Image (cartoon, coloured by chain):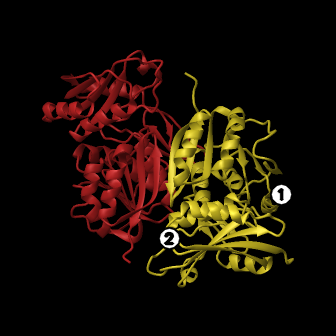
Chain colours: A yellow, B red
Amino acid sequence: MTEILWQKVIVSVDTVDTQLIDWISYLLLEQEAQGTEVNYAYGYLENHPDLFGEMPQEISDEMLKKDTEIIGYYSEEQVIDLETLDKAIKDALSEVQYSIKLESFENENWQKNWMQHYHVQRVSRFITIAPIWEKYEGSKDEKVIRLDPGLAFGTGTHPTTQLGVQGLEMYIRGGETVLDVGTGSGILAFAAMALGAEKVDGFDLDPQAVESAIQNKDFQADIDISNVNFAVNDLLVGVTQEADLIVANILPHILVNMFEDARKLLKDDGYLLLGGIIEDQATKLEASLKEHGWKVVQKNILNGWVGYVTEKERDE
Amino acid sequence: MTEILWQKVIVSVDTVDTQLIDWISYLLLEQEAQGTEVNYAYGYLENHPDLFGEMPQEISDEMLKKDTEIIGYYSEEQVIDLETLDKAIKDALSEVQYSIKLESFENENWQKNWMQHYHVQRVSRFITIAPIWEKYEGSKDEKVIRLDPGLAFGTGTHPTTQLGVQGLEMYIRGGETVLDVGTGSGILAFAAMALGAEKVDGFDLDPQAVESAIQNKDFQADIDISNVNFAVNDLLVGVTQEADLIVANILPHILVNMFEDARKLLKDDGYLLLGGIIEDQATKLEASLKEHGWKVVQKNILNGWVGYVTEKERDE
């Protein structure tokens, strides 16, 4: 493995409040962090593995009384605006002590450490995600998605990925064409195929994510990948093929920019599935959906994250 | 078919507001109605079949401008407290015109009419509900639950039943023992088995529901019913067998009465799945869950109805 230099922004806060921690992670992701990680004091790591790009799902107040580190990972060449970050945190967390520091580190150790904590995850009754370095055979009904998430988002352990898979399982009936916006590791594209979709096109702005998704095609054993394609693309800009389903698991302020294009590409009786939204952002996102002619069919909330199933508002 | 005399309470309101209509249906169910039905003026029925015990899922303002009838069905011997109903409606709907009337009718026509509107329903990717009078063969992966819902609640078309099935699909992994509280037609018990549960015990206070659930066992072709049992019981009172999953799709003010018993019977790593809750009741129910030591894992909202997946709050 080549040694790549990475940067990390470490925000230390004097709290274990999950809402605040999620919110800081969100700020880091908004500043284009490639992934975030949360470290708690007092042996949290031993008991609750935390994962690249993933929030821990539970925190025991007993174990952790004070410091929490929220770490954002950036590539060597990314320019990080610490001042804006500082201001955003200051505006929101008036009663919490915090500090910010920037460090550089080498890639290999980080990945190794992360691999130790990433295991088989049964996401729903029928879909299981397994890292390629673990042997796992599912039961008869179980479809196993095999992933090397690399540096792309989507290991299956994050609530927003789980909500995406669940949403697909609830609304796919078989034979659908699907567009996957912000495909990351390709996880939702594979899930859609596992659930019976006919064809999936996955897009990501990040060439590294697309490379990772393409590579992940080779690892699929249970899933037909002959009709799965990945490409670098800015959301749905320039895409022309219509779809029965569009799925997008990305940050809300980016989601908004594809609502118009999605309306054009989605068939009238199709569904747009959205993820990547923390609960605090829900009201704003729902207003934006309404404004762009989308109607919420179903809203699923898991550990502070929200997944939406929406359809086109019918013209009266 | 024998001719049984039934009573219906017809509430006519000058609105097509779904929240209000749902709320009146809810009041009727609170007064022990065996089922409710909503009729809209201006040909709504022709376009949107409405079903016994089921709310229509969509209303077009264009089609319906004024009167809506919300009908509660009661057996011949039930005593209906119209005064309390009137007061409850008056308290809530200060700006809406309404009237209440009580009528008697014979059973057969009602059932016949209802059968015309009840068709195959694909509830999730893997679970489909089909009435016994329709021929339907599912695809390879699809499990078909065949039902004659009779007079029991649970045809698969109501959002709260859909949420129940979805919740089971998300949290069943195979091999679980399940308690189904308020089983109605037995639909969730069959769904649990279809999804790989090992054993299901379904309870209902209403002997007619239990009879209907037992009868429905005979119609199952895709689903192993050898470990499904139904019995008349008041919630979980007196039940002793432990379970990996407890599912209860009943009205919130009744749900609350089983939270203690459910805590005793559910294994520590098990889930309690709740349905039957309209969105307005969610805050109150969540407070009650917390008070009884339950923690919400996932909250799913579909067309104004809420399904919860909860687990035991861990003692710190």
Task: Say whether residue A3 is left or right of residue A192.
Answer: right
Label 1 is found on which chain of the structure? A
Label 1: which residue?
Answer: A207
Of B107 and A169, the residue lying toward us: A169
Residue B69 x/y as whole percent = 31, 23
Task: Say whether residue B110 is left or right of residue A313.
Answer: left
Residue A144 x/y as whole percent = 66, 62
Of A51 and A142, the residue lying toward us: A51
Query: Residue, x 59% and y 34% (percent of image)?
Result: A291
Residue at disc 2, secondary structure: loop
Query: Residue, x 50% and y 54% (percent of image)?
Result: A301
Q: Is residue B125 visible?
A: no
Label 2: which residue?
Answer: A58
Of A239 and B7, the residue lying toward us: A239
* Vertical side of B278 occupied by B174: above or below: below
Q: Is residue B84 visible?
A: yes
List the single residue furthest toward the right. A2
Residue A121 x/y as whole percent = 60, 67
Residue A156 x/y as whole percent = 63, 63
Question: Which residue type does callout 1 highlight?
Answer: Pro
* Vertical side of B169 occupied by B264: above or below: below
Q: Residues within 10 Å of mark 2 (few under 14, many from 20)?
A: few
Q: Quadrant of the N terminus of chain B?
A: top left
* Vertical side of A194 occupied by A105: above or below: below
Question: Which residue type does callout 2 highlight?
Answer: Glu
